[in-house]
Every structure is written in C-alpha cells, then in structure tokens.
Amino acid sequence: MSLAVLRSRALAGMEAPAVSVEVHLANGLPGIAIVGLPDTEVREAKDRVRAALQNSGFDIPARRITINLAPADLPKESGRFDLPIALGILAASRQIRDDALHRYEFAGELSLSGELRPVRGALAMAFAMARDGDDDMRAFVLPLANADEAALVEAAAILPARTLLEVCAHFANAPDAPKLARHHGPGLLHAPLYPDFAEVKGQQHAKRALEVAAAGAHSTLLIGPPGAGKSMLAARLPGLLPPMSEAEALESAAVQSLAGGFSPERWRQRPFRSPHHTTSGVALVGGGNLPRPGEVSLAHHGVLFLDELPEFDRRVLEVLREPLESGQITISRAAHQADFPARFQLIAAMNPCPCGWLGHASGKCRCTPDAVLRYQGRISGPLLDRIDIQLPVAAMPPESMGAQAEGEPSAIIAQRVAQAHARQVERQGRPNSQLGPREIDRHCAPDEAGRRLLHDAARHLHWSARAYHRVLKVARTIADLADLQHVSSKHVAEAIGYRRALRDD
C-alpha cells in the first residue's frame, strides 16, 4: 500500500498538539492535495516540497498525492510541515525506509534547494514531545538553527539536520550512511548583561523602593519630571531580580519561541520588554487570526516597562487589568481560544503633568489644575489601584550631580533580594505580590501599632480593599528584606510611603 504516516506538531497557544502527517499515493491525474484545515503557508508547501525533492535528486511520483494533516479540526499554520510532507512522499514511494519513522517526530521548513530553515515554536514542540513521551520515546528531527533552543528540554532527544538529504541519509539502508547525532545544547551561555545600579547616582529613596519591588515582584509607578532618572532606574531592575528557576526559564523561553524571538544566549535571563506608547491593544496582550503572544506574555517572569504611561491609549492600558491580577491572558476567537501566561512585573514611568515640570524647583510648569487632572486622569482608578508602589522621583539639583559617589552595585542588592525571595518561597511558595486574601491574613498581619497606622491611612486616603491589601503585601516584603518574621509599624509606615497615589496628591 502506498501510504506513509509521520508525526509532527502544531501550535495552539502555549500547547503543541500532535499532528499525524498521512501521505497517500493513488492512481489518477498527477498532483498534490493537502487537506486537514491548512492555512496558506501550509498549502504552499506542495510547491516548496516539489522543488526541494527535485533539487535533492529524488523522483516526484507521477501519481495523485493526497496529504492529510490530522486531526482535521485543528488549524495548521507555518512551514513546519514541509519536512514531514517531503519524507512522507519519499516513504510512500519507497525511496526511503519507512519502518523506523514512527520513532521520530519532524518539523522544518524547506528551501527550494532542500536546505532546512528554522521554524517558530521549536522549544514548545520539544517540551510537548518530552511531556507526551512514553516508553518508546521518539526523537525530534528539526533544522540545525533550532537545535540549541529545542535542546534546552533535556528530556527530549534532538536530532538536528542542515538539509533534506541529511535526514534521508539517516534512514538509508547502507551501513556506512551518515546518521544524525543527538544535540546536547549550547553548553555555557553568556552571563546576564543588565545595566548596573552603581551607575545611578543619588535617588536613594527610589532605589530602595525598587529593591522592595524586586524582592516581592511588586508593580511600580515612577512619577517625576524629565531627566529625573525614571527610565534609567527601570532599565536596571532586571539585574536585581532573583535567579530564574528551571521551570520559570522554560516557560519564559517557550513564550519567546512561540513569537520566533528566542535566543539561547538569553537562557535564564529575565526578559525586559519596553513597548512604545503607540502600541495597540492586540500587540500588548496578543491576538491575531491564529493567536500569538503579546508584550505581556513576552515579559513572562520578567519586566514590562511602560514609559510615558499617560501617552498610551486608555483602552490599551485597560487590558492590563486582568493579567495583573490573574497572571495569564485568554485570547478568544470565533473558532478557538488560546491561553498565554502573563506573570510579568509592571514598571511604569510618567511625568506629573503635560509639560512634565509640575513640582520642579525651577517653577517652569504653567499647566492649569484642570490640565494636570486631565493628564493624570488618562490612567484609570482601577488600573492605578493595581499598582503596588507609586513613587515620586524628584529631579537632582545640578550642584549635586557631580558630587554624588557611585551607588551600590546591582550584585550586592541582588543578593539581598534573592535572600528575601527565598524566604517568601519557603514560607508560602510564591512571591508576596501573588498572595491571596487568606494568605495575606496569615502571613502579612502587622502588630497592633502597625494595624492602627494602616487603618488610619486607609481611612484618610480613602483606599479600596485592594489598595489596603497591597500595602500589607509591600510591608511583608520590607520585613522579609530585614529578615524579620513579623510585620511591625515601621514596615507598615514605609509601605504607606510608597503609596503616593496621583489621586492623593
């Protein structure tokens, strides 16, 4: 029977469901038909495969070729099915052996010359193959350019190839035919290269607030005039964050792989995403006909920095409210939906008024109170309520800029942050920012003086229940940095000082 069945993977959100590539040769008018809900890229595979086979020295069967990508109700996209389709045609026409194909999975786009080009989502596919594996573990054959990325999944056997001919030689009957060798990853990777906090002179209050934010994964808003150092401080936050665990690194890398932007050199480095304020809502949260991750997911387990926050479209900012609370985003379409992780740390910066100089010692601001309120009102109350730390950043006087000594290096601050983070994980299994109401009552309860201080502040500043709980979580982080078991009034007072909401000024 002129039939061959190979295995590959599709992409559906963060999942990589298995796909059977069935190739059947039948009598009839010669041609290639692809069925199984293929998109345009997949339908065009027949032309790429035909040219690749011819230029690699193989014969194109003069028969009716039907290619079925099962399951039929799962959308298939991209050129990753080129390689299994080409091998299926060769196996069905008995040009290569087919008795061992069931022990492999294949993915790769073919050039017209038969070279293998990289595909998107190799890490997600390798992870799914290793997770779904049984006693007869399959190996994954893919382009060499994807090998380092896929080999990060240690349980997966990765066999990279440069060309279609190399893959075919692996299945040849000749004993001296070259075989594909398992790839074991790139070895030592580059150390994280984040800007150092030692370069920031002055701004001790802001640096202390960012240390607290890093230790507890708290969202932060920096408010100050142009040139105060808001962007400089935010760019250095990733260097303070605790090291990524193996699971966090795999999740973050898998999201980057889905977007086609992952590089093995960034393995275990916290992502830092800084989209421009003209970014659309779809670009921020993800979407598309076949949903792809947006900026909030590409910043998973890292930092999402939004500079000039009021300049973003208000409807774009509102989409942040759900992922800030849940740590994930769901993209729904008529035919299907996709879930993407979005456990990011939001760092935002803004000027206090349209001209930016409100409160500056120069007195240059000429904005009217109504203009200031309209400008600050571009950030809705519900979104502002979800930001744990809201901190004014004052401009440094000119005479102090050259006199300031270098600040504390990021490495020293990161040690304190890592120790505080380890205390949180040991106590509750997660950072303080992710605690629920019951966990807040159990782990964040202050002493009597702290409780009275917190109640007075909540009454005077008209805090919501969410704001009240977020101040408690920040106070818990401050106590963790001090290696103290209980939250005192001193910690509560510092946490209240980090809650200078715009509406309270």
Image (spheres, rainbow, N blue to C red):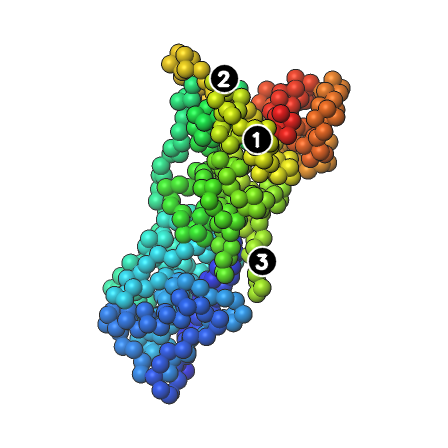
**In this rendering, is residue 82 above or below 301?**
below
Which residue appears at 62% of the width and 22% of the height? Answer: 497
Task: Please tell me how crowded label 1 is: few (under 14), some (14-19), or many (20+) other residues with Cα within 10 Å.
Answer: some
Q: Position of residue 409 (x, y in %)?
A: 43, 21
Q: Which mark is residue 36?
A: none
**At label 1, which amino acid type do we have?**
Val
CA separation in Å, label 3 and label 2: 50 Å
- Report the mark closest to the observer, 3 or 2: 2
Q: Residue furthest bottom?
A: 28
Per the image, label 2 sits on a secondary structure element best described as loop
Do we see residue 370 in this rendering? Answer: yes
To which residue does mark 3 refer?
A: 332
- Report the mark closest to the observer, 3 or 1: 1
**At label 2, which amino acid type do we have?**
Ala
Question: How many badges with numbers are in the image?
Answer: 3
Which residue appears at 43% of the width and 28% of the height? Answer: 232
Q: Earlier in the sequence, mark 3 or mark 1?
A: 3
Which residue appears at 40% of the width and 71% of the height? Answer: 43
Which residue appears at 59% of the width and 44% of the height? Answer: 318
Task: Please tell me how crowded label 2 is: few (under 14), some (14-19), or many (20+) other residues with Cα within 10 Å.
Answer: few
Q: Position of residue 210 (x, y in %)?
A: 52, 26
Q: Which mark is residue 361?
A: 2
To which residue does mark 1 refer?
A: 372
Q: Position of residue 104 (x, y in %)?
A: 41, 63
Q: Quadrant of residue 491?
A: top right
Task: Please tell me how crowded label 3 is: few (under 14), some (14-19), or many (20+) other residues with Cα within 10 Å.
Answer: some
Do we see residue 213 in this rendering? Answer: no
Q: Quadrant of residue 495?
A: top right
**In this rendering, is residue 486 above or below 430?**
above
**In this rendering, is residue 71 above or below 26?**
above
